[in-house]
């Protein structure tokens, strides 16, 4: 159970990796509970983030930005452009999680520099903290999870299922219900979700497919993000092409 209106139980998010406000507007128009603009692996440059966040706002869709690393500069820029929060990848320790939370808050609680340019246009509380979501996808993060979820002010944990698999010596296909070592991988994921839920922290996970979303929900994920739009676009184009040639 969560009291955060962004990470409601069962929420399904969209995931954007193409540098396009128009594509963001399409994603926003289909009813996702929230959408993430991915600047870690996505092909999205800093200048395009603003237009994508504006396009999402135009559809009334709330947004997160996955920043490329732990630096406070990228976190502040995402929040100044109006993102509701950030996803910080590859967090290993409670200290790193606490630094992410601090980067989303102004002093005295945090270290964010004041300059909420776009939020101020929309009557949003200029001092409102941004949501800090930290990714658990490494061996160290799993080992340190009890301390990570105890960090004051953490909005949610987000599992990177592919990095998590590789870091623990699993094939990527372990994410599939009938994949190699699927049971051991499921135990790993369930262990993470159980610790988050016991601590009252929403726990989400990236899902390559609706089947993964169902599987991971059954393993305790409280919210999910559906596959990146570029992967869905390519799969649909290939399917329609094959169909047209049939
Ligand atoms: C992962 O699977 O490692 C991710 O970071 C998903 O975006
Ligand atoms: Mg990852």
Image: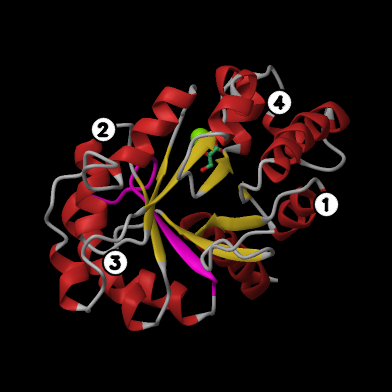
Classify mark 4: residues with Cα within 10 Å, few (<14), some (14-19) or many (20+).
some
Picture residue at 63% right of the left edge, 37% below the top: 161
Of badges 3 and 1, nearer the viewer stands 1
Q: Would you say the magenta stretch is mainly helix, strand or loop?
A: loop
Label 3 with label 1: CB-CB less than 8 Å: no
Q: Count how many numbered circles sit on residues in the image.
A: 4
**Residue at mark 3:** 52
Q: Which residue is mark 2?
A: 71
**N-term-proximal mark, 1 vs 4:** 4
**Earlier residue among tags 3 and 1:** 3
Mark closer to the chain start, 1 or 2: 2
Q: Earlier in the sequence, mark 3 or mark 2?
A: 3
Of 225 and 176, the residue lying toward us: 225
Q: Which residue is mark 4?
A: 171
Q: Position of residue 189 (x, y in %)?
A: 74, 35
| Separation (CA) of disc 3 from disc 1 | 32 Å
Work out which quarter of the rendered image holds the N terminus and state it.
bottom right
Quarter of the image containing the C terminus? bottom right
From what the image shows, is residue 223 above or below residue 245? above
> Does residue 245 lie above or below 58 as drawn?
above
Above or below: residue 62 compared with residue 235 = below
Image: magenta residue range: 32-45
Q: Which label was assigned to residue 64?
A: none
Q: Nearer the viewer, mark 4 or mark 2?
A: 2
For mark 2, does the 10 Å Cα neighbourhood hold few (<14), some (14 to 19), or many (20 or more) residues? Answer: few
Alpha carbon of mark 3 to alpha carbon of mark 4: how far?
A: 33 Å
**Mark 4 vs mark 2, CA separation in Å:** 30 Å
Q: What is the distance, in whole Å, between disc 1 and disc 4 at their CAs?
A: 21 Å
């Amino acid at each position: 159970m969560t009291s955060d209106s962004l990470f409601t139980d069962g929420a399904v998010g969209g995931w954007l990796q193409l540098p396009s406000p128009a594509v963001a507007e399409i994603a926003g128009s289909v009813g996702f509970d929230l959408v993430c603009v991915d600047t870690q692996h996505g092909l999205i440059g800093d200048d395009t983030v603003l237009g994508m966040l504006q396009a999402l706002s135009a559809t009334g869709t709330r947004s997160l930005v996955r920043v490329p690393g732990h630096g406070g500069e990228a976190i502040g820029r995402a929040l100044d452009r109006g993102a509701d929060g950030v996803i910080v990848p590859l967090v290993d320790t409670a200290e790193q999680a606490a630094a992410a939370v601090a980067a989303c808050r102004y002093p005295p609680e945090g270290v964010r520099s004041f300059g909420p340019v776009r939020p101020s246009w929309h009557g949003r509380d200029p001092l409102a903290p941004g949501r800090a979501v930290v990714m658990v996808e490494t061996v160290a993060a799993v080992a340190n999870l009890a301390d990570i979820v105890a960090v004051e002010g953490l909005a949610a944990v987000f599992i990177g299922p592919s990095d998590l698999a590789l870091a623990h010596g699993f094939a990527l296909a372990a994410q599939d219900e009938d994949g190699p070592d699927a049971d051991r991988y499921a135990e790993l994921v369930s262990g993470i979700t159980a610790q988050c839920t016991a601590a009252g922290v929403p726990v989400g996970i990236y899902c390559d497919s609706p089947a993964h979303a169902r599987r991971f929900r059954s393993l305790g994920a409280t919210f999910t993000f559906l596959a990146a739009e570029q992967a869905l676009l390519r799969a649909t184009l290939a399917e329609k092409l094959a169909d047209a040639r049939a």
